[in-house]
Amino acid sequence: MKCNKVIKILGVVVCGFVLLLSLIGCAPAPTPTTKGNISFADVGWDSVQVHNRIAGFIVEHGYGYEIEMVPGETIPLFEGLARGDIDVEMECWVANQREAYDKHIAAGDVVDLGSNFPDSWQGWLVPTFMIENGDLPQGVSAKDMSQYWELFKDPEDSTKGRFYTGPAGWEAQKVDEKKFKAYGLDEYYNIFLPGSNAALAGSMVAACEKGEPWFGYYWEPTWVLGKLDMTKIVEPVFDKGVWDQERACSWPSTEVNIVVNANFPDRAPEVAEFLSKYKTTTAMANKVLAYMQENKASTEDAAIWFLKEYDSLWTEWVPADIASKVKAALP
């Protein structure tokens, strides 16, 4: 009986102490809770990494989820998305991964939430000054490039020109190989694989700054095409039959969509709804990427810049209470 009384007295004392602490503002802060983890496919180019961090900041600070950026290359990460190892891909370039996309959409492994930005482009380029100084003709076509290989001599093989494609693992690199065979350019050029996107962009910038020839693949939105004056190589109008058989035509209209694992909308319906409203443009992306380049900013810095610069845009993607939480978290 005495023990019971002592326990009761101690309980009252402890409760009173906690109450006193809370009244004077010294009570321990409650441990923050989250709703779980949401992972993003962090593919190796700047625009997708910025979009991941814009969406990630909103998801973390607005909706209360922990976020994870999973690095890797296009197809392996998309397969991870289909398996459920990854939740969100903010830039699914559908044409570049058509086979995997069609397969997993048909199987119901992934869900397409719609376009992130609808006005992107990809293809082959040369510096505009090569046309202006008469080295290349106006409207130079892919097939014409066999006549001009000597302008682009490979420094490691003087018998052929050099063409810069995407790094190994990019679907664009595989497409370029098929295009070269279809156009007969493999007889005239070596396809050079840079080690990274930075190396690919760097090769273009270095050539243009020195006034030297450059021939290769690139896309927009990117800071480099915002900075440099480049001209697109003409290819035949896109034809699905030709594309499916040998790729000897322009790239199809580029869909850059937000795709999630099929289970994700049930697990995080409010986030899936937000992502379905997430809409930007190539011009916006070019501005963000130019900000990064000019200020030597990280992708995290660029995401914060976007959230401040385009306040009136992203606040339309989320409810008002979520927007308030995100704004309060901005540095």
Image: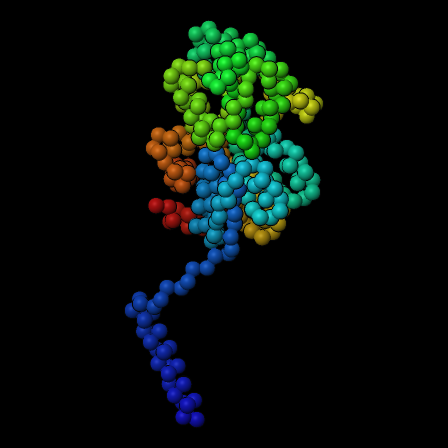
Q: Which quadrant of the view contains residue 286?
A: top left
Give the percent coordinates (x, y) of residue 281.
49, 31
Q: Which quadrant of the view contains residue 8?
A: bottom left
Numbered label tally: 0
| View extreme (left): residue | 24
Between 288 and 223, the one lying in front of the other is 223
Which residue corresponds to the image point at 37% horizontal and 83% vertical from the top-left?
10
Which residue corresponds to the image point at 48% horizontal and 34% vertical from the top-left?
45
Relative height, residue 197 to residue 55 (above, below): above
Which residue corresponds to the image point at 43% horizontal and 7% vertical from the top-left?
133
Which residue corresponds to the image point at 66% horizontal and 34% vertical from the top-left?
99
Quadrant containing the C terminus is: top left
Between 263 and 180, the one lying in front of the other is 180
Query: Left or right: 89 with respect to 287?
Result: right
Quadrant containing the N terminus is: bottom left
| View extreme (top): residue | 134
Give the percent coordinates (x, y) of residue 7.
40, 85
Relative height, residue 101 to residue 38 (above, below): above
Q: Mark yes or no: residue 124 visible.
A: no
Relative height, residue 181 to residue 135 (above, below): below
Q: Mark yes or no: residue 96 visible.
A: yes
Give the percent coordinates (x, y) of residue 243.
66, 23
Rendered image coloring scheme? rainbow
Give the percent coordinates (x, y) of residue 225.
45, 23
Query: Left or right: 29 with respect to 125?
Result: left
